[in-house]
Image (tube, rainbow, N blue to C red):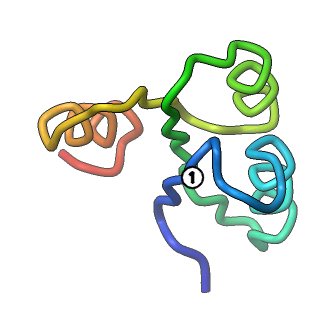
Amino acid sequence: NSPDVVLVAAESAGPSPRDLVRKLRRESNGKSPIVILYADQPDMEMIGQSILQGAADVLMKPFDRDILQFKLQQAGVLD
């Protein structure tokens, strides 16, 4: 039972966003969740590696409801 969308804080403790995206993709049993990262600082290497592993997009803080809604529409989660 996999979620439809996963929001991942790029600066959180634990596995790197790249590794977390890879793990979510590997353990999804055919239905991969849409992964969106959010970050305080633009780390182009982390963003690039995460997108190469399957992240759908990146949000830079601060973001508001309208931006989140737009990103979810782009990812095909919302109509």
Picture coordinates of residue 50 (x, y %)?
74, 33
Residue 20 lies left or right of residue 67; in this view the side is: right
Residue at coordinates 54% horizontally, 51% vertically from top-left?
34
Amino acid at dot 1: Val
Picture coordinates of residue 71 (x, y %)?
32, 34
Residue at coordinates 83% horizontally, 57% vertically from top-left?
15
Give the number of marks: 1
Residue at coordinates 81% horizontally, 26% vertically from top-left?
49
Residue at coordinates 74% horizontally, 19% vertically from top-left?
48
The quarter of the displayed image where residue 2 is located: bottom right
Residue 64 lies left or right of residue 1; in this view the side is: left
Q: In the image as oriented, which residue stretches furthest toward the left?
A: 66
Count residues near mark 1 (Cα–Cα under 10 Å), then give few for <14, some for 14-19, many for 20+.
some
Residue 47 to residue 54: above or below:
above
Read off the residue under disc 1: 8
Q: In the image as oriented, which residue stretches furthest toward the top?
A: 44
Residue 3 to residue 45: above or below:
below
Q: In the image as oriented, which residue stretches furthest toward the bottom?
A: 1
Q: Secondary structure at mark 1?
A: strand
Q: Nearer the viewer, residue 11 or 66?
A: 11
Residue 72 to residue 34: above or below:
above
The quarter of the displayed image where residue 62 is located: top left
The quarter of the displayed image where residue 79 is located: top left
Q: Nearer the viewer, residue 32 or 61?
A: 61
Picture coordinates of residue 13 (x, y %)?
73, 59
Residue 67 lies left or right of residue 75; in this view the side is: left
**What is the quadrant of the N terminus in the image?**
bottom right
